[in-house]
Image: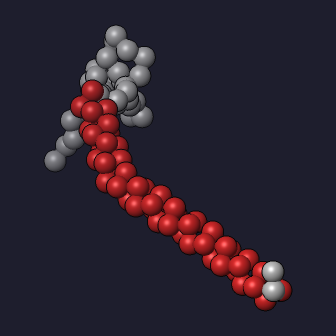
Amino acid sequence: MTRRPSSKRAGEPRALARGSRRHPPSGGCHAGYTLVELVVVVGLVCAVLTAAVPALDAAADSAEVAGAARYLASVVARAQIDAARGQ
């Protein structure tokens, strides 16, 4: 069985088709993101923010309640100190 000589020389890289990742089309300087990829990313960010906003509102409400409780505790402590002094 004999091998046919190839038309390419050994060590020469294969030619890649235009528009592939390595060789962009002649109109652009590099391959970028497509419109579909950008729309998908924007949609995912919106979905995450939609889920996060109620959790942030609940955390803010909880912090407000905790602040009011601390203030009330300080008022009670001050009243107890004043009562102990007989004022």
Quadrant location of the C terminus in the rendered image: bottom right
Where residue 33 appears, as percent x and y from the top left, is: 34, 29
> Residue lying farthest top?
27
Where residue 34 appears, as percent x and y from the top left, is: 29, 28
- Asked whether 48 or 21 is in front, the reply is 48
- Give the answer, above or below, for where 79 lies relative to 20: below
- Asked whether 80 or 4 is in front, the reply is 80
Where residue 8 appears, as percent x and y from the top left, is: 31, 28
- Give the answer, above or below, for where 7 lies relative to 61: above
Residue shown at the point (72%, 84%) measured from the top left: 80
> Residue lying farthest bottom?
84
From the viewer's perspective, is 17 left or right of 68?
A: left
Q: Quadrant of residue 37?
A: top left
> Residue lying farthest left?
1
From the viewer's perspective, is 49 left or right of 74?
A: left
> Residue lying farthest right?
85
Q: Quadrant of residue 44?
A: top left
Residue 9 showing in the rendered view: no
